[in-house]
Amino acid sequence: MTNIVYATTNPGKFAEVQKLFLGHDITIHSAADYHVNIDVDETGTTLEENAILKAEAYRDAIPDEVIVLGDDTGVEINALGGEPGI
């Protein structure tokens, strides 16, 4: 069984991601399971950079050696040149 910590304190986001892994040999843990509640400064210029910042911050805050999944979302509209973006 693979254990993954999802880097969020948002219970709604956690529930959505948890459903994605149902039926797989993977258990998703919330940051709350590790008593971690941090505010990550999202200074990245892309969604990917911000997801990495979150994953690294949570990984550093959790005492166990675990896999941490970070994500970020935004709206990018081609007709608006990618705006509003991240």
Image (tube, rainbow, N blue to C red):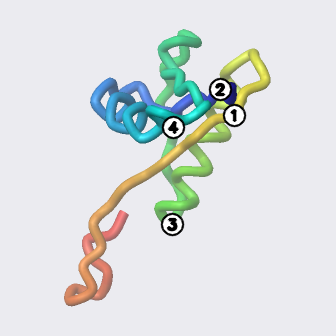
Q: Which residue is mark 2?
A: 3
Q: Quadrant of residue 8?
A: top left
Return the x and y of residue 6 as percentages of the image width and height: 52, 32
Q: Is residue 41 left or right of residue 16?
A: right
Secondary structure beneath label 2: strand
Residue kind at label 3, given as amino acid type: Thr
Residue kind at label 2, given as amino acid type: Asn
Return the x and y of residue 50 as percentages of the image width and height: 52, 53
Where 86 sits versus 4, above or below? below
The answer to whether marks 1 and 2 mark residues whose Cβ atoms lie closer than 8 Å is yes
Q: Which residue is mark 3?
A: 45
Query: Of the residues tagged 1 and 4, which is closer to the observer?
Result: 1
Secondary structure beneath label 1: strand
Where 51 sits versus 24, above or below? below
Residue kind at label 1, given as amino acid type: Ile
Gap between marks 3 and 4 measured at Cα: 14 Å
Q: Which residue is mark 4?
A: 40
Where 34 sits versus 40, above or below? above
Gap between marks 4 and 2 measured at Cα: 22 Å
Q: Residue at x 53, y 22 (%)?
A: 29
Secondary structure beneath label 3: loop
